Image (cartoon, rainbow, N blue to C red):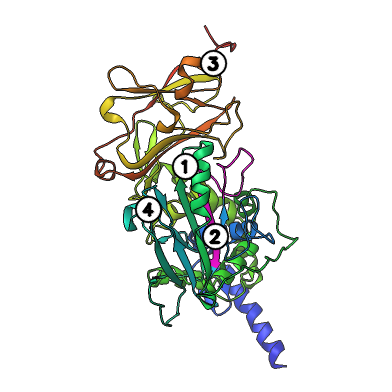
Amino acid sequence: MGIMRKSFFSSILKAAAVSVGIAICGAHAVESIADAKAIAEEAYIFGYPLVTMEMTRRVMTNVSKPEANHAPMGEFYHSRTYPSASFRDITAPNADTLYSTAWVDLSAEPFVLTIPDEAGRYFLMPLLDAWTTVFEAPGTRTTGTGAQSYLITGPGWSGNVPEGLKEYKSPTSMIWIIGRTYCNGTAEDYAAVHAIQDRYKLFPLSAYGTAYVPPAGKVDPSVDAKTAVRDQVNRLDAETYFRTLAALMEKNPPTAADAPLLERMATIGLRPGHPFELSALDAEAAKAVQEVPKTALAKILAHRSEAGVQINGWTFSLKTGVYGEDYLQRAFVTAIGLGANRPQDAVYPISESDTEGKDYDGLNRYVLHFEKDQIPPVQGFWSLTMYDSQYFFTANALNRFTVSPRNNLHYNDDGSLDLYIQHDSPGVENESNWLPAPADKFVLIMRLYWPKDEVLNGHWQPPGVKIVGPRRGSATEG
């Protein structure tokens, strides 16, 4: 009798609420259907990095032993060569360094990370929390190239740090280590970097001082290892997406600064550690929320024009790696370049169009000209990388995805530099300066590792890419 009465009055309350435009969710209410959708869009954008990180982790750790850019939880996978054109685990990979990556769960205990003497070689070992924030960045710039050891601890851990280890405290239980060791791509240098990689060590604190052997990983056959992770995330329906987000926030807590948004999210029933139920909203609100993945994703991708200043056809941003409450920026960087570094370690000018404002197309030939005083000013290294329109590598005859000083670039007599960006060879004499393009649309990303102050303070600007004519032999060539 009591339950029936409660159900009856709940139905009356919902009907009345809909008649005045209020969306009911449990004991909470939002002002209108539009408000419910707006909050859900905020929540989608807010959670996009966390959900993407989790989906990436599932794919990259779903193996019994390290192989093919994957490794079990808590274990390094060391890339022995640059990623190939078939690599789809993350967007905008680099082909300048060899990756040493590991996913670690700190909820049970801390992990020890040891780095050998790099003998002056450039390296970077950023630690990302589950929200993609780089919370520590040991490397050549910050800690030098000597041997070093760390204890990585999770939220709430308060034990004793063994002598000789420096504590790095993560704000979340899930972390991603994305080590990068510079390599010039020759067989000799590959071997030298492999020897360094083999001395990177990662193991749980309980194994400290022992001859630790990582356990075999567990393989989940339900994990989709074929579809690009970004596509998997973008295809999630609203209820699955928000359920995933709610579960992940329990072990990977938002920051205190996120509290105002969390309060708004609670009004649609989205709370850390509590299953999200779309049915808890009235029918009209639920219908509106179901549309959110499409509309919120569109907002994320449309943020490109606001992601940084626009200079000579490049989007030039210094807002990577650490985001604070700039949730849209964080989501945008996740969508196009998951795992981005702090700007002090790397800056990534991105360009999709030439100096005339036209999208790049392999039907045309382009030149990027650097005056002598425009050569990217870095203390690490710089490169220019080619991607298809989806930010993945594209196959080409040279198997070259990036061009940089390691290609023995030919400089002009006055010290300036021309890089040739086109589908077909610019001629044998210019091939050292050639960045092969696909036959159709493409995107360019410049990488400036350990940029000098003139990059960070805006005094240096990347030159624009100029179209010089149609592809030779094409129907449009004059």
Q: Quadrant of the N terminus?
A: bottom right
| Label 3 Cα neighbours within 10 Å, binned few <14 / some 14-19 / many ≥20 | some
Q: Which mark is residue 471?
A: 3
Q: Position of residue 382 (x, y in %)?
A: 38, 38
- Confirm or deny contact between disc 2 and disc 1 (CB under 8 A): no
Relative to 414, residue 52 above or below: below
Of callouts 2 and 1, the N-terminal one: 2
The stretch of residues the image draws in magenta is 79-104
Question: At label 3, which amino acid type do we have?
Answer: Arg
The residue labelled by disc 4 is: 342
Distance between the Cα atoms at labels 1 and 3? 32 Å
Q: What amino acid type is highlighted by mark number 2? A: Ala
Which residue bears the numbered disc 1? Answer: 183
- Callout 1: 10 Å neighbours few (<14), some, many (20+)? many
- Front tag of 3 and 4: 4
Closer to us: 386 or 330: 386
